[in-house]
Image: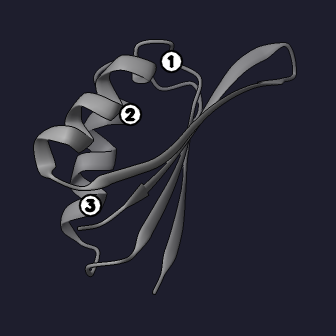
């Protein structure tokens, strides 16, 4: 299994979600994406896109980095 980290910090809606969806199409079943985002809309959009694709959102974490909210999603390819 492969783990791919995506640095999507600074990108605005809809780019983080579109890039995650595109990356999911290139992965093998069981592979993992770790997406790091700063756009607050990603907290809604990425989980929704994962549900639509049938993939699995393992976790969604919110933290701080340099005074900015950092959202980290762990997504497993179905």
Disc 2: which residue = 16
Report crowding for label 2: few under 14, some 14 to 19, many 20 or more residues within 10 A (C-alpha): many
Disc 3: which residue = 24
Taking the spot 35% from the left edge, 77% from the top edge, the residue there is 30
Report crowding for label 1: few under 14, some 14 to 19, many 20 or more residues within 10 A (C-alpha): many
The answer to which quarter of the image holds residue 22 is: bottom left
One can see residue 42 in this view: yes
Report crowding for label 3: few under 14, some 14 to 19, many 20 or more residues within 10 A (C-alpha): many
Disc nearer the start of the sequence (2/3): 2
- Is residue 76 shown left or right of residue 66? left
Q: Is residue 3 above or below residue 9?
A: below
The answer to which quarter of the image holds residue 14 is: top left
**Element assignment for label 3:** helix
- Is residue 63 shown left or right of residue 67? left
Q: How is the image coloured?
A: one colour
Which dot marks residue 39? 1
Residue 17 in percent (x, y) is at: 31, 34
Marks 1 and 2 in Cβ contact (< 8 Å) = yes
Marks 3 and 1 in Cβ contact (< 8 Å) = no
Q: How many marks?
A: 3
Taking the spot 23% from the left edge, 68% from the top edge, the residue there is 78
Q: CA distance from mark 2 to mark 3?
A: 12 Å
Q: CA distance from mark 1 to mark 2?
A: 8 Å
Taking the spot 13% from the left edge, 49% from the top edge, the residue there is 53
Residue 15 in percent (x, y) is at: 32, 30
**Which quarter of the rendered picture does the N terminus lie within?**
bottom left
- Is residue 62 shown left or right of residue 74? right
Residue 7 in percent (x, y) is at: 58, 46
Q: Closer to the observer: label 2 or label 3?
A: 3
Q: State the residue lying farthest toward the right.
A: 66
Disc nearer the start of the sequence (1/2): 2
Q: CA distance from mark 3 to mark 1?
A: 19 Å
């Amino acid at each position: 299994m492969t783990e791919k980290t995506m640095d999507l910090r600074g990108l605005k809606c809809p780019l983080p979600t579109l890039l995650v969806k595109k990356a999911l199409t290139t992965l093998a079943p069981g592979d993992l994406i770790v997406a790091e985002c700063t756009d607050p809309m990603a907290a809604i959009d990425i989980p929704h896109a994962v549900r639509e694709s049938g993939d699995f959102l393992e976790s969604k974490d919110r933290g701080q980095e340099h005074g900015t909210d950092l959202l980290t999603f762990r997504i497993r390819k179905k």
